[in-house]
Amino acid sequence: MEKIILVRYEEIFLKGLNKKNFENRLMTNIRRKLKKLGDVKVTSSQSRIYIESKDPAFDMDEAMIILRKIFGIASFSPVYKIPSDYEAIKENAVLIVEDMLKRNPYKTFKVEAKRGDKKFPLNSPQICADLGGVILRNFPNLKVDVHNPDFIFYVEVRESTYLYSEIIYGAKGLPTGTGGKATLLLSGGIDSPVAGWMIAKRGVELDAVYFHSYPYTSERARDKVVRLAEILSEYCMGLNLHVVPFTDIQLEINQKCPQEYLTIIMRRYMMKIAERIAQKNGSLGLITGEAIGQVASQTLESILVTDDAVNLPVYRPLAGLDKNEVVEIAKRINTYETSILPYEDCCTLFVAKHPVTRPSLDKTIEYEKVLDEERLIEEAVENTEIVRIY
Ligand code: ATP
Ligand code: MG
């Protein structure tokens, strides 16, 4: 009895003629991620993906932890693969249930069968009824409960037969690399890692940009962003983090522009620099963690002024979420604990006591005129450090 992993996808079914491309990309991503565990064979058949390894070092539990972070996987199961022969099915089912009962105090069960191979002599209801009877006879303490069983014994008869009882939910979404690339403005806060994760989930590769205001923001603040990028990279197959020196720009804006417009002008500079970097790395859009109304710089008026700074589409997947909804996702994807580490944020430096909540675009553009925009942006981009996180 061979133990392998069966992987299911959902949305890829809707891709029509492109389905094969999506499936191939998902298989490539699975191979890349599992490579470090040893020799692995990843194949597909009838819209399912199968992962098997004869390598004695292959750690199935570790593989399943990795699979949970691969976009495009709807769910997966550790399964026993056996020949499609009813005698073999009965024999192995008894062995598997016996093993399960050693580890779990199960009292009730039901059998669910799927016959993908119509040549198999029993149909699905017949397999359920007969195999249910076999299990009851071998384990007199078990009872059938079709509504709320302690475990479901699944039987899938295809070219081989797969027996299992566990279904683990995956990260869903679409396989990384099927949706082009976008550049995430990644701060050390709670919001932006979640925003990046949400867009990456749709198959989009990420690059990230972090604006670092050394020495006003410390090396530890930078390390925290690197750590967040590492957590994100586990989901999105690696990324480049561009660390932009932002101190000179902030000092100059602070010196030359009206106090209540500091934040909004700084945000426009972030967008412009991110766009420059995005164009160099082949990104098709920018991503921010802005949520409507969260702070003064995220009112609709402020977002309009911020957005005006760039031509690339800006994705704001958190626009309609409340803070606690964002926190919930951050906890689920494991960025929260890092995000709440208390290191300073460049946006909390040089902040006005009363930033405008309804900035005017005309005034903003007028106030910006005193700045030597091209030089500031050029210098920042030139001195950007790229950290490869793979
Ligand atoms: P976050 O929790 O993501 O820091 P926030 O609620 O603190 O967001 P702001 O500080 O107004 O909001 O920033 C809005 C967005 O601008 C962030 O979500 C992020 O995308 C981007 N941003 C802010 N500061 C930086 C920075 N230092 N480097 C890169 N991007 C930044
Ligand atoms: Mg922030």
Image (spheres, rainbow, N blue to C red):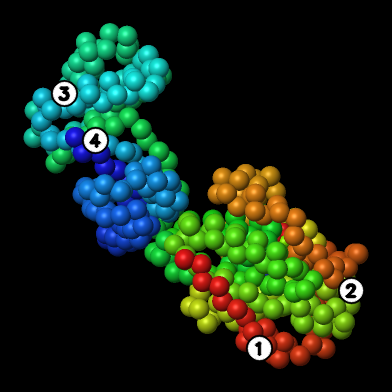
Question: Residue 307's x, y, as percent?
Answer: 67, 72
Q: Does residue 213 sit above or below 374 in this rendering?
A: above
Three-letter code for the amino acid on which mark 2 is drawn:
Gln
The residue lying at 36 percent from left, 15 percent from top is 108
Tell us which disc is closer to us: 4 or 2.
4
The dot on residue 378 is: 1
Tell us which disc is closer to us: 1 or 2.
1
- Residue receiving disc 3: 91
Q: CA distance from mark 1 to mark 4?
A: 59 Å
Task: Say what secondary structure mark 2 lies in.
Answer: helix
Three-letter code for the amino acid on which mark 4 is drawn:
Tyr
Three-letter code for the amino acid on which mark 3 is drawn:
Glu
Q: Quadrant of ligand 1?
A: bottom right
- The mark that comes first in sequence, 3 or 2, is 3
Task: Say what secondary structure mark 1 lies in.
Answer: helix
At label 3, counting other C-alpha atoms closer than 10 Å, the crowd grade (few under 14, some 14-19, many 20 or more) is few
- Residue receiving disc 2: 259
Task: Say what secondary structure mark 4 lies in.
Answer: strand
Question: Residue 51's x, y, as percent?
Answer: 27, 48
* Residue 101 is at least partly visible in this image: yes
Q: CA distance from mark 1 to mark 2?
A: 25 Å
The residue lying at 24 percent from left, 53 percent from top is 41
